[in-house]
């Protein structure tokens, strides 16, 4: 057979088998992906492992936290952890978890670092868990302080308390929980007014950019401030706090509540924007629009995004077809690439307010605070567990 005829024959054979080979390859890839997807039992086991590591490290719930200075154990970082612990307790009602949370609230007399008249959402954040524990066992002292605190805020005309976007997560769910608890719309109304002030008025024109569907951390980071590549500065964990807050609030309040439609609109827009900038490894960079500015894996923001999107899938407001692969990749990275065999969580950016803070972010580095990242991880784990049990 001439060389030219042989070449033609080989080409025809290749064309004939290529579709079958492609189909077989695609099927194999799908099978591999399915095999790599964590089961509900595995998700719960990872949550338990990470939480046990923390509880064993911090057996004394009242022990102060010492970094650059000494702080009480009811500050926002620890309060976010307890949000996650209560999520774990919902799917794994281990009495140890409940007692650990009750002991924490009791130690602090169900109060806050700066007293009952504080307007600082960071200090109010502990009230989220106080309310959860009241709902389990309605002892009046558990919610007396948080009710007085938030009633003080509701009674005034001031709406500008949340001047940094982290505060949206620290504060909003408290208003939502009290509104449901007392069946009183005044909490929902005030929550909406404060959210919209942060969204549309703080900084030059609000901290939310309707063009990019993401948030500047505070008024110091809106234009003309930019990242080294000229893009707007969208800090990963800052945006994580917002999407986490929106999911938590919508999970609590009735759908006909004032503000629900706005929260849902912003949540869906954020989810779409975030999915576009996910890294190939499943995590997100600390700078969402500048991957070269301290680029690399980061745990806390990734866990928050995973939580929000998994909640969205579970509640039918995000497309499972579109967002499940995003969430699966994120959770796979959190457990396989970030979590150590003993439950320690790696790649956690320390506290701060922008990409350059708490650097470097590495697998082995101990952040100044590790509790808020664990809280987000447990919240995400609960939603993934529920997703697997649908």
Image (spheres, grey):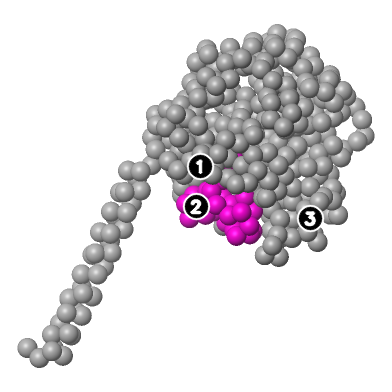
Identify the residue position indicated by label 2 in the image.
322
Residue 205, position as x, y percentages in the image = 84, 54
Image coordinates for residue 354, horizontal then vertical, percent: 70, 48
Rendered position, 329 above or below 3: above
- CA distance separating discs 1 and 2: 29 Å
The secondary element bearing badge 3 is classed as loop
- Image quadrant holding the N terminus, namely bottom left
Is 5 placed left or right of 141 in the picture? left
Q: Is residue 373 visible?
A: no
Q: Determine the residue located farthest toward the front in the rendered image.
A: 68
Q: What residue do we see at 17% from left, 76% from top?
A: 13
Task: For label 2, count other residues whose C-alpha is less than 10 Å away and answer few (under 14), some (14-19) or many (20+).
Answer: few
Tell how many labels: 3
Q: Residue at x 86, y 54 (%)?
A: 204
Q: Residue at x 15, y 82 (%)?
A: 9
What is the number of the mark on residue 363? 1
Instruction: Determine the image quadrant of residue 332.
Output: top left
Q: Secondary structure at mark 2?
A: helix
Q: Quadrant of the C terminus?
A: top left
Helix, strand or loop under label 1: loop
| Badge 3 or badge 2: first in the primary sequence | 3
Looking at the image, residue 212 lies above or below residue 305: below
Q: Is residue 126 magenta?
A: no
Return the residue at label 3: 222
Residue 248: percent from left, percent from top: 65, 34
- Between discs 3 and 1, the one toward the N terminus: 3
Compared across the picture, whether 156 is left or right of 40 comes to right
Q: Main secondary structure of the magenta part?
A: loop
Residue visible at 75% across and 43% down in the picture: 165
Q: Nearer the viewer, mark 3 or mark 1?
A: 1
Q: Position of residue 272 (x, y in %)?
A: 60, 53
């Amino acid at each position: 057979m001439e060389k030219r005829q042989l070449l033609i024959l080989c080409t025809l054979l290749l064309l004939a088998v290529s579709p079958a080979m492609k189909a077989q390859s695609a099927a194999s890839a799908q099978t591999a992906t399915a095999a790599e997807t964590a089961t509900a039992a595995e998700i719960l086991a990872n949550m338990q492992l990470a939480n046990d590591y923390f509880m064993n490290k911090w057996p004394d719930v009242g022990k102060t936290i010492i970094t650059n200075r000494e702080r009480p154990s009811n500050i926002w970082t620890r309060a976010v952890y307890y949000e996650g612990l209560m999520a774990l307790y919902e799917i794994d009602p281990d009495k140890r978890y409940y007692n650990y949370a009750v002991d924490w609230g009791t130690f602090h007399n169900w109060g806050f670092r700066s007293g009952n008249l504080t307007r600082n959402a960071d200090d109010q954040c502990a009230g989220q868990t106080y309310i959860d524990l009241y709902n389990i066992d309605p002892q009046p002292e558990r919610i007396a302080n948080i009710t007085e605190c938030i009633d003080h805020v509701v009674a005034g005309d001031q709406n500008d308390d949340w001047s940094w976007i982290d505060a949206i997560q620290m504060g909003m769910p408290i208003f939502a929980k009290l509104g449901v608890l007392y069946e009183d719309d005044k909490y929902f109304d005030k929550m909406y007014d404060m959210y919209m002030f942060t969204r549309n008025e703080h900084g030059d024109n609000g901290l939310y950019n309707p063009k990019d569907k993401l948030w500047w951390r505070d008024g110091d980071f809106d234009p003309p401030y930019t990242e080294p590549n000229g893009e707007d500065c969208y800090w990963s964990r800052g945006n994580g706090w917002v999407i986490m807050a929106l999911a938590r609030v919508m999970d609590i309040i009735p759908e006909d509540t004032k503000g629900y439609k706005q929260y849902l609109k912003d949540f869906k827009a954020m989810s779409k924007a975030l999915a576009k900038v996910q890294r190939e490894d499943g995590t997100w960079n600390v700078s969402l629009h500048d991957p070269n500015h301290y680029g690399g894996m980061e745990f806390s923001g990734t866990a928050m995004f995973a939580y929000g999107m998994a909640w969205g899938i579970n509640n039918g407001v995000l497309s499972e077809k579109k967002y499940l692969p995003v969430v699966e990749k994120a959770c796979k990275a959190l457990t396989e690439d970030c979590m150590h065999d003993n439950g320690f969580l790696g790649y956690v950016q320390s506290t701060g307010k922008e990409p350059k803070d708490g650097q470097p972010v590495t697998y082995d580095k101990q952040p100044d605070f590790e509790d808020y990242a664990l809280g987000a991880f447990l919240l995400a784990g609960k939603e993934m567990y529920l997703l697997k049990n649908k």
